[in-house]
Amino acid sequence: MRDERVVKQSVEQASSEILDILAVRGKVTQSGAVTIPCSSYPEEEQVHRMRHPWSVYGVSAAELERAMDRLRAHLPAKGWKIVKDGPDKSQAKLPQIVANSSDGHLSADLRLWREPAGSERSSMIEVTVVSDCFRSKPDGTAGTG
């Protein structure tokens, strides 16, 4: 059994750990983990997952590329298993790292968005940390689903 607050705390702690590994002095979007339905279950079963999307921006693309290299080097040392490291499936073929926590309860999707010189938008690393699915109970506790 896992309490929803514990799952949220775990997801946000993983995000904080990833931010520490990135080690860039850019701007970070402020958001917290939110509960979303787990798409592989019918809605009435009340099975959810936590999702924490955020990004870091306001530094050069070269600095962000070095940050992605730090992720490649340091995520495994922190107990994460990199399961994908290459271009994503978008038309832009963004550099993407997908890593799973050692306990299997969390996954992180990290993508580097490089903006061309002179662009009004900033290059950024987009991070999404998600939990595995868990079931909400009528008494407010949660169990794994």
Image (tube, grey):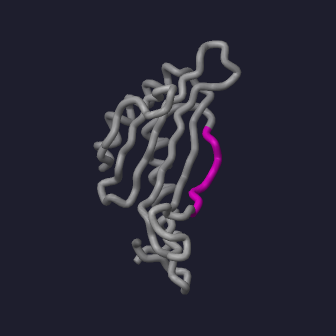
- Corner quadrant of residue 109: top left
Where the C terminus falls, by quadrant?
bottom left
Where the N terminus falls, by quadrant?
bottom left
Magenta residue check for 125: no
Magenta residue check for 31: yes
Residue 131 position, x and y percent, is: 45, 59
Position above or below: 132 against 52:
below
Residue 133 position, x and y percent, is: 44, 65
Residue 144 position, x and y percent, is: 40, 72
Residue visible at 55% across and 85% down?
A: 138
Relative to the observer, which residue lies in front, 77 or 132? 132
Furthest residue toward front: 42
Residue 8 position, x and y percent, is: 52, 63
Furthest residue toward right: 120
Residue visible at 29% across and 43% down?
A: 76
Position above or below: 93 against 50:
above
Residue 30 falls left or right of residue 113: right
Residue visible at 43% across and 76% down?
A: 143
Residue 33 falls left or right of residue 70: right
Q: Could you tell me what secondary structure mostly forms the magenta stretch?
A: loop
Relative to the observer, which residue lies in front, 129 or 15? 129
Q: For the magenta stretch, what is the residue range?
A: 28-35
- Corner quadrant of residue 34: bottom right
Relative to the observer, which residue lies in front, 103 or 88? 88
